[in-house]
Image (spheres, rainbow, N blue to C red):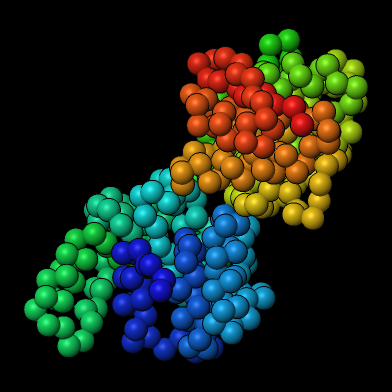
């Protein structure tokens, strides 16, 4: 059973009576794949876009389980696939996308719609705010009625009324140029003590967009110090974002005359990998980029002597454990694992589970954990 958000449920209600067979349709903002799968089953030429590789794998698996070929239908890319599209659907919740990323993606969708084509957008949260958002891109936009299910009893009617309080839907039509086109990328400088100031570009969707994250800087400072003591540097930066930690550490190592032999940047978000590529360009020819929510390839072991990671701590540390388990697989014997957290208790226990020991290094109000393979 697929658990749908209010926004996705609203779009399902909207497409119930639509003729979609043969139409070229874009679905953006989806995480479950339920809507594009339904459209594909009904004969639409559908393309579904996701930013995060975890969502991409979920949707791909759902298509395969339903016997619908996912090839050339699913995209995990920094931008939506090229159109023109006859129709588009977009859904979001306040927790799933930042305001900048919503606007940036709406602009992207607008550019790929055919002239006169409609976008159906469903938002959870304040309907007036959502309408103001779509009007920043689509000059021709208005609310759309979400059709109720047929044959409802009184209890179901009450439930549907409660549902309508959580979601707002709009029909937006492409007519000429977008109302306003803005560039949401951002540039800023960062450095480690004794290192050169370096300029970074971040994109909406990247972790810590528009700034250098304090935890990331704490990690970069310790990583730079460790890297400068090595004979050569072979570093993997997991959850790399725009590449801040790995780039600062590698640049400092190079300044200390330590050869940078290998760099690998890993993130599950397509926008993060795109930003890291921008920031590495012209600096390190040996850099590798991997879009993954599961670290380095499972069959690959060793090859690196430093791992850096600033893992998220939700999902009961399951994602953090993926980081540490990846570090253990990726590092050669004697390699250094560095992670960062505000308070080390839970992550320290996790890191010790794999490495046996974890030293706490205080920095910038954070705690960097160092383990040796």
Q: State whether residue 273 is above or below residue 63.
A: above
Instruction: Residue at 24%, 78% (x, y): give it.
Output: 147
Q: Which residue lies furthest to the top in this view?
A: 194
Residue 256 position within the rendered picture, expressed as x and y whole percent measured from the top left: 85, 15
Q: Can see residue 309?
A: yes
> Quadrant of the image for the C terminus?
top right
Total numbered circles = 0
Q: Can see residue 175?
A: no
Q: State whether residue 116 is above or below residue 370.
A: below
- In terms of image quadrants, where is residue 259? top right
Residue 24 position within the rendered picture, expressed as x and y whole percent measured from the top left: 54, 80
Q: In screen coordinates, is 135 left or right of 78?
A: left
Identify which residue, 67 or 189, lies in the foreground. Answer: 67
Instruction: Residue at 79%, 22% (x, y): give it.
Output: 227
Identify which residue, 347 or 247, lies in the foreground. Answer: 347
Q: State whether residue 14 is above or below residue 127.
A: below
- In terms of image quadrants, where is residue 153? bottom left
Residue 311 position within the rendered picture, expressed as x and y whole percent measured from the top left: 57, 37
Q: Which residue lies furthest to the left in this view?
A: 154
Instruction: Residue at 40%, 74% (x, y): give it.
Output: 1
Instruction: Residue at 59%, 50% (x, y): give it.
Output: 269
């Amino acid at each position: 059973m697929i658990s749908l958000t209010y926004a996705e449920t609203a779009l399902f209600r909207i497409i119930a009576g639509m003729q979609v067979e043969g139409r070229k349709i874009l679905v953006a903002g989806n995480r479950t794949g339920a809507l594009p799968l339904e459209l594909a089953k009904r004969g639409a030429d559908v393309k579904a876009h996701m930013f995060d590789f975890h969502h991409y794998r979920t949707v791909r698996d759902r298509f395969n389980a339903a016997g619908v070929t996912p090839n050339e239908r699913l995209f995990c890319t920094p931008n939506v696939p090229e159109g023109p599209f006859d129709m588009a659907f977009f859904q979001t919740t306040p927790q799933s996308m930042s305001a900048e990323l919503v606007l940036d993606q709406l602009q992207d969708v607008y550019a790929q719609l055919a002239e006169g084509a409609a976008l159906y957008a469903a938002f959870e949260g304040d309907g007036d705010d959502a309408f103001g958002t779509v009007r920043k891109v689509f000059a021709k936009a208005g609310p759309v009625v979400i059709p109720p299910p047929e044959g409802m009893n009184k209890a179901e009617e009450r439930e549907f009324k409660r549902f309508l309080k959580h979601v707002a839907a709009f029909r937006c039509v492409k007519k000429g140029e977008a109302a306003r086109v803005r560039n949401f990328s951002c540039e800023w400088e960062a450095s480690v003590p004794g290192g050169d100031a370096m300029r970074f570009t971040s994109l909406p969707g990247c972790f810590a967009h528009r700034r250098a994250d304090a935890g990331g800087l704490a990690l970069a400072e310790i990583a730079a110090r460790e890297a400068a003591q090595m004979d050569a540097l072979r570093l993997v930066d997991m959850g790399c974002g725009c590449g801040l930690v790995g780039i600062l550490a590698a640049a400092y190592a190079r300044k200390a005359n330590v050869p940078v032999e290998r760099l690998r940047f890993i993130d599950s978000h397509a926008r993060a990998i795109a930003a890291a590529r921008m920031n590495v360009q012209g600096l390190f020819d040996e850099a590798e980029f991997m879009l993954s929510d599961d670290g380095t390839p499972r069959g690959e072991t060793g090859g690196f002597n430093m791992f850096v990671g600033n893992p998220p701590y939700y999902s009961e540390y399951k994602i953090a454990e993926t980081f540490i388990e990846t570090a253990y697989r990726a590092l050669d014997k004697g390699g250094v694992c560095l992670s960062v957290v505000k308070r080390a208790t839970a992550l320290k226990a996790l890191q010790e589970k794999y490495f046996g020991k974890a030293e706490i290094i205080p920095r910038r109000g954070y705690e960097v954990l160092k383990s040796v393979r």
